[in-house]
Amino acid sequence: MSMWRRLQQQLFKSYQVSVMEPEGRNNVRHIRVNLATVLAVVLLLSLGPVALVWYFGPPQSSSLATRYYQMKQQSHDLSNQLATREGELALANEQIDGLKNELSSSQQRGEDVRQSLNIYESILEARKSSGVRILRASAHMDDRNPATGESELSYSFVLVKGGNYPRSVAGSVRVMAIGKDKQQLLLKLGKKTDGLRYHMDTHVFLDGNVTWSQDWQPVKLHITRLNSQGIERDQMDIEIDRNKSQ
């Protein structure tokens, strides 16, 4: 007989148990039980409380997982809100920069308009007298270019004819650069001649620039106006501005 067979016989072998009822000692009940039934009852009594706690107790693992995903979603939402606020802030800064640039441009346009207004006021004032006058003369020289050793010399001025007669005048203008040690150089303003020709009824704006490649630096320009017969009529000296270009 195998061991498993003997174990089954022992587990399911019936035993008679006598139980005396409380009504009297003569009242006795006989109950037949086996070892398997006793072990099942003991196991049920042992595992029952554990099963009840597991079934009715709080699902801690599930609660922690739920809380974790809730916090993860909140973090994601906050990140999206932060990105949105950063985008709105960047847009606001761009708009502010745009307004600053527009304000700066408006201020520059206003300054240009004021300068133009001053020039035309000077022209109208000069028109009240007779003859031709040189107004608003200025000159500027940039720093030397390290690569070429050359500089850019620019000039500008206005010629104004006073009165109504003659109806128009013509002539030319010569510009001579003068150095600190009295060096002189007649600037070549025209393509074929050193003079800059003009013809006007009321006024004319004359400006231009030349490339300066001499070893010495000019400190002023000497402007000479000639009439149509080549006779010198007016002269003016202007200092050269050496401030850096803006």
Image (cartoon, rainbow, N blue to C red):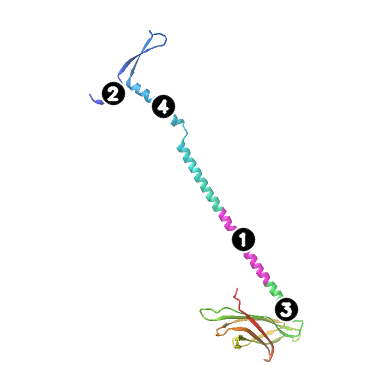
Disc on the earlier residue, 4 or 2 = 2
Q: Give residue 122's mark.
A: 3
The reply to whether callout 3 and callout 1 are in contact (CB within 8 Å) is no
Extreme-front residue of the structure: 181
Q: Secondary structure at mark 4?
A: helix
Q: Give residue 96's mark.
A: 1
Query: Which region is colored magenta?
Result: 85-111
- Residue that appears at 61% across and 80% down: 154
Instruction: Inspect the image, locate mark 2, and give the three-letter code of the amino acid beneath it.
Output: Gln
Disc on the earlier residue, 4 or 3 = 4
Q: Is residue 79 above or below residue 171?
A: above
Disc on the earlier residue, 2 or 1 = 2
Residue 86 is one of the magenta-drawn residues:
yes
Instruction: Inspect the image, locate mark 4, and give the three-letter code of the amino acid beneath it.
Output: Gly
How far apart are the two marked residues, 4 and 2, measured between alpha carbons?
25 Å
Q: Quadrant of the N terminus?
A: top left
How far apart are the two marked residues, 4 and 3, measured between alpha carbons?
112 Å
- The percent position of residue 187, horizontal first and vertical second, equals 60, 86
Instruction: Inspect the image, locate mark 3, and give the three-letter code of the amino acid beneath it.
Output: Ser
